[in-house]
Amino acid sequence: MLQSDKRFSSLYKIAFLCGLIAVNCVNEVKSVEFYAEKPAFLPSCKIYQPGFTKCSTNSVQKLIDQLVIGIPEVVEEFGPFDPMHVHDIYFKQDGNDVARIHANLSDVIVKGFSKTNIKESRVSKRDFNWITKIFLPKMRMDAVYKMEGQILLIPLRGSGKMFIEIDNLDITLYTKTRLYEKAGFTFDNVTAVRVDLNMTRVRTNFENIFNGHSKEVERSTNEFFNENWRDFYEALKPIITETVETILYDVMHKVFNLIPANFFVEDIPTSEQLYGTNKSLTVA
Ligand SMILES: *[C@@H]1O[C@H](CO)[C@@H](O)[C@H](O)[C@H]1NC(C)=O
Ligand SMILES: *[C@@H]1O[C@H](CO)[C@@H](O)[C@H](O)[C@H]1NC(C)=O
Ligand SMILES: *[C@@H]1O[C@H](CO)[C@@H](O)[C@H](O)[C@H]1NC(C)=O
Ligand SMILES: *[C@@H]1O[C@H](CO)[C@@H](O)[C@H](O)[C@H]1NC(C)=O
């Protein structure tokens, strides 16, 4: 069985050596399928005791802090947490009055998750779904885009670099999970996420948004989007929420297949206890 603490410290040593002698050491870090011992960074909580939500909020914050430092198995799959490289996004939205967009984004980089502040983490005792309130002072997405369509009645056809910068982003994250058993542990299978977003400001810039036809019109169009950022955000809301949902789903799906739910919630019922015929634990 794996000793997580020792493992983390030896990983730091490897990382340090790699930094010193500047070689690619990635292949020497053996990743595991799941953690059989509780990682030291993670405080665990008891859902059937008072103060669970406070404890859980702190626990999820500690998890985020560790993701920022780097959890090897997550880094191996997704690279660093912040800035994060996201796979290409293909986006198609038709039949909307404010926006009709076909957009492809590549070289997508999202910055800002290292400043994630977990405001509240609630777990339902009924189905072990979660509602998480998250605050990010700033989130910025840079990408290379290719777009056709129309936003706020302006017909667009262009390609080039773009960014979207969001200030004071409040995220309410709804996570659906299904418990399952593996090797004597209970795990959360994250099966769906949905986010609800609020912000105080969106700034954007699309280079070459009219395929170079007029720099002046390009500048004034971007200005128009920034002056009318609420309408602009409403128009682009599906693409922004979808991007945030994809990132959070991918990371959470990975993390919760890696770390048993028992290490977050010590007294979590087994999947049999929760879904099975034994109803005694399902009523909170
Ligand atoms: C996006 O990529 C798809 C698949 O490569 C392509 O069919 C589509 O035309 C592209 N859309 C734009 C707006 O470039
Ligand atoms: C966003 O603001 C609306 C209206 O003020 C509110 O109902 C909603 O709960 C807020 N959502 C988030 C994620 O803060
Ligand atoms: C997790 O859920 C997905 C569907 O959302 C399913 O395909 C997968 O088999 C599940 N994994 C486990 C271990 O239950
Ligand atoms: C039901 O769950 C309770 C609490 O874990 C346990 O004590 C009891 O033995 C279980 N009953 C059955 C029939 O599995």
Image (spheres, helix red, strand yellow):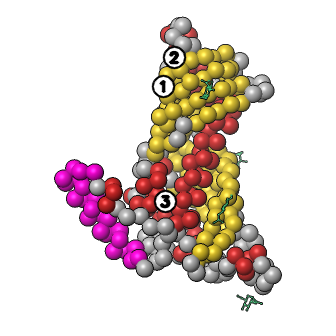
Q: Is residue 156 above or below residue 54?
A: above
In the image, 193 versus 284, the foreground residue is 193
Q: Is residue 251 left or right of residue 271?
A: left
Say which residue label 3 marks: 64
Q: Magenta stretch: residue 173 in it?
A: no
Q: Position of residue 269 (x, y in %)?
A: 67, 79
Q: Is residue 23 magenta?
A: yes
Gap between marks 1 and 2, in whole Å? 8 Å
Any part of residue 170 in sight: no
Magenta range = 2-24
Between 281 and 23, the one nearer to me in the picture: 23
Residue occupied by mark 2? 208
Assess whether mark 2 and mark 1 are in contact (beta carbons under 8 angstroms): yes
Q: Residue at x 44, y 60 (%)?
A: 73
The kind of residue tagged 2 is Asn
The picture places residue 139, in percent across and down from the top left corner, at: 51, 42
List the residue tagged with mark 1.
Answer: 161
Residue occupying the point 54% across, 7% down: 213
Q: Assign a secondary structure to mark 3.
A: helix
Name the side, left or right, on which 27 lies relative to 205.
Answer: left
Q: For the residues marked 3 and 1, what is the alpha-carbon distance in whole angstroms? A: 29 Å
The image position of residue 20, as x and y in percent, is 19, 54
Counting residues from the N terminus, which is met first, the one under dot 3 or under dot 1? 3
